[in-house]
Amino acid sequence: MEGLSIGGIGTILLVLLIGGGAIVALRAIVRSATKVGRLASTVTDIIKKADYEAENTPKSLSSAEPLLLDRIRRDFPEYNPELIRQRVTKDARTFYESAQAGKCFYVDGISDQLRERLESFLSPDVAGDIRIHKVALAAYDDVSEDRVLTFQAAAAFKDPAGVTRQRRLILKYLAAWATDTENGVRKTNCPNCGAPIPAVGSKVCRYCGTALKVWAGIGWLLTDLRED
């Protein structure tokens, strides 16, 4: 130490102080980088979880059947909820099978307008593994002259990249005479006065008051089908 001047000692101390500060700063940088790495890992995990849930969680449905069933059966005493659910499930599956094949597989029970629309706009995204998780009655329109059931269906399929896509379908069915001849719906006439009966499900002729029992020949015509 005798050979060192006061200036030399000061220089050494300055270097040590700077070196110590650099080490502290370096440690802070390492800690920050570790925190950033942990944050990035957490974000990645969240994204992976969200992707997994998006692929494996069916879309939610709005079911109003308990509230609507009495109203439907007032118009259509023969209405069978289980049979119509089977029909809706089949129509929903046919929608995606048609998209996968690139051609419309619907044969009957569908309006001409809807068939033409589906033939023109089949999705190219369906590669297979089609599943219909469940269906639910969402609404019943008995206010207008027509009677319309609205169903929702939770569906899934794999796209060309092998990713599972969850979808919600909206399907609408119009009550129609079983012997449709014009635009998918044929009107009938009162057996007493011959006046037209405008609404399927009508119980009384609006012109002469005759009680009507015409529901035996009723079917449900698919008039609208789209992804929600």
Image (spheres, rainbow, N blue to C red):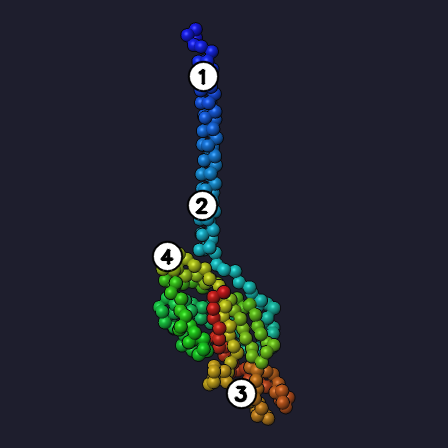
Q: Is residue 85 visible?
A: no
Q: Which residue lies under the disc numbered 4?
A: 162
Question: Whole-Å distance between the Cαs marked 4 and 1?
Answer: 67 Å
Taking 208 as reference, is 221 above or below it?
Answer: above
Q: Which mark is residue 188?
A: 3
Local packing at callout 2 (Cα closer than 10 Å; few below 14, some 14-19, many 20+) is few
Q: Nearer the viewer, residue 22 or 43?
A: 22
Q: Earlier in the sequence, mark 1 or mark 2?
A: 1
Mark-to-mark CA distance, 3 and 1 = 109 Å
Q: Secondary structure at mark 4?
A: loop
Query: Which numbered mark, 4 or 3, is in the foreground of this view?
Result: 4
> Which disc, if any, is residue 136?
none
Q: Residue furthest bottom?
A: 193
Which callout, 3 or 1, points at the residue further toward the start of the chain?
1
| Residue type, mark 1 in image | Thr
| CA distance for labels 4 and 3 | 50 Å
Query: In terms of depth relative to the viewer, which is nearer, 197 or 12?
Result: 12
Per the image, the residue denoted by label 1 is 11
User: Three-letter amino acid code at disc 3?
Assistant: Thr
Residue 127 appears left or right of 91: left
Q: Which residue is mark 2?
A: 44
